[in-house]
Image (tube, rainbow, N blue to C red):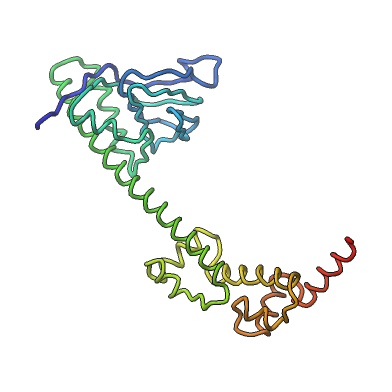
Amino acid sequence: MENLVLPQVISAGIFNAQLAVKNRSVTKNRKTTMFEIEIPTECGGTSYIDDGEHRIDDSCVICAKPGQMRHTRLPFKCYYIHLIIKEGKLYDTLMKLPDFIELSDNKRVRDIFIGMCEYYSLETADGELMLQSLILELIYLISKNAEVCGRRHREKNSNRRVIEQTIDYIRSNLSSDLTLEKLANNAKFTPAYFHKLFKASTGKTLRDYIEYQRIKRSTELLVSTDMTVTDIAYECGFSSQSYFSYAFKRCMGVSPREYARTAVEKYEQGN
């Protein structure tokens, strides 16, 4: 394979910060000089790399690059491998990896780390060959996991923006016919998927959210205008004055007129 420069393995093994760092809860902040790839063996502390941080758990691979600043809040126990590589495709791949990589299945990756530790300790030609083959597999697997995580992160951000845009649209068009089909079409999702996404993002069904926003707007109109209850009902998108009164009392505990009267009395008492 063109431009495939194999890494120099500096060390591999298992690290227990509780034994290495006594009477301290945080390791010293230090600058890395090589690639430090680790998989925790248990959940516990927090890993810090430059401005990023990640709660330590055994479904995550940590990949610190040369020149980064890192420290760890204990507890922290891991399998690790330290590599020096300064050019080539493997170098480019490692440099592009995120510092913290979530694994969809950590069993094979953990087995690779265990195997690397065993072959590193053999110090034989066969051991070196097996060690390098496992390193290549490790880089391949964590790179693929990073790609999947990246796609999920981009999709999540994209979905969040869609929901934010939908919320802005709802608040600006409360008097319109805000149907699930119309809003889902605007978002370019199927109605079923859009409804699921909206509820997951807001904690409310689309219907409940729209009704809440309409009632919230109606409370503002009740105390700041001389509009009739019927006019406010239609202005806020309710199909009738009777349904508006029903929905308002269910949400606020009083009728629209009682709410307006109480608000006026509180204002007059305050003056």
| Residue 191 horizontal/vertical position (percent) | 41, 71
Up the image or down, 21 lies above or below 156; here it is: above
For the C terminus, the image quarter is bottom right
Residue depicted at x 36% and y 37%: 101
Up the image or down, 24 lies above or below 156; here it is: above
| Residue 22 horizontal/vertical position (percent) | 52, 14
Residue depicted at x 33% and y 18%: 33
* Nearer to us in this view, 154 or 196: 154
* Nearer to us in this view, 270 or 257: 270
Up the image or down, 131 lies above or below 169; here it is: above
Name the image quarter holding residue 253.
bottom right
| Residue 137 horizontal/vertical position (percent) | 21, 34
* Nearer to us in this view, 245 or 234: 234
* Nearer to us in this view, 95 or 124: 95
| Residue 200 horizontal/vertical position (percent) | 49, 59
Residue depicted at x 74% and y 70%: 224
Q: How many marks?
A: 0
Q: Residue furthest left?
A: 1
Query: In the visual, does 112 lie left or right of 163?
Result: left
Query: In the visual, does 63 lie left or right of 205?
Result: left
Name the image quarter holding residue 139.
top left
Name the image quarter holding residue 49.
top left
For the N terminus, the image quarter is top left
Residue depicted at x 40% and y 30%: 41
